[in-house]
Amino acid sequence: MMKLYYGPGACSFVPHVALEAIKAATGEDFEAQAVKLHKGEQKTPEYLALNPLGLVPVLVVDGKPLTQIVAICDFLDRRFPQVGLLPADPWQRAQAMSTFAWMNNTVHPTFTHIFRPGNFAEGDDAQAEVKRKGVESFKSHLERIQTLAEKAAPFLTGDKVSVVDAYALVFLRWGGLGGIDPAGLPVYKTFVERLAEAPPVAAAIAREGITLETFKK
């Protein structure tokens, strides 16, 4: 049985949804282990043995750990192609992977500037500027995702919930935590609310104990 180490509300939500979709479509069950990031459980010797970087997610398959969202989701899609975690058509799959890679290598790191500005600057003023610019850039990324949501049919890559959809949900939640009101992204917000009702997504949300409403006025 595969085992996923995840942090509630973290980017590990993406493979979490993928595994729920696999379970629903094939009956292939998995074990889910929450890693309490706020308590530093990702820095324990046991966890570092799985991922020396101390990050989530980690997927353990046949006793072997696999890290990094793109690698994990690519593996799951190739192992269970019938589930449709990514489109089957080679060109459409490549286009979906292009968006997925952009989410992982651009949108995701941008949020790090908001959440951990101390990684990029010293001093309160400098860190405040890093965070301000981070929010500005992150909002522009969310606006781009909203343009994708406008074309959803009914999901971002077609008629099945994909890993691209799951990442989109994560980012809108994070935007709220960063002070970006989702009401300013109405199409995106409606899309995520509808996405959250899909059984694999709802199951992951329930296990992680998270809510879509993260913005505080």
Image (spheres, grey):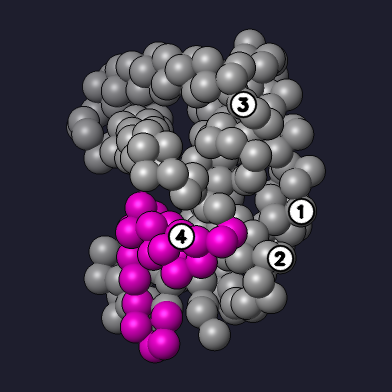
Estimate how packed mark 1 is, as few (under 14), some (14 to 19) or many (20 or more) residues with alpha carbons within 10 Å: some
Q: Please state which amino acid type lies under the numbered disc 4.
A: Asp
Please report the residue visible at 43 percent of the width from the left and 44 percent of the height from the top. 89
Q: Please state which amino acid type lies under the numbered disc 2.
A: Ala
Q: CA distance from mark 4 to mark 2?
A: 14 Å
- Specify which label sits upstream in the sequence, 3 or 1: 3
Q: 86 or 44: which is nearer to us?
A: 86
The percent position of residue 47, horizontal first and vertical second, equals: 38, 77
Q: CA distance from mark 2 to mark 1?
A: 8 Å
Tag 1 residue: 199
Instruction: Tell me if label 3 and label 2 are in contact, CB under 8 Å.
Output: no
Q: Taking 11 as reference, is 4 above or below it? A: below
Estimate how packed mark 4 is, as few (under 14), some (14 to 19) or many (20 or more) residues with alpha carbons within 10 Å: many
For the C terminus, the quadrant is top right
SS type, badge 2 = helix
Q: 174 or 1: which is nearer to us?
A: 1
Q: 71 or 86: which is nearer to us?
A: 86
The span shown in magenta is 61-83
Tag 4 residue: 77
The circle drawn on residue 38 is none
Indicate the quadrant where residue 188 lies. top right
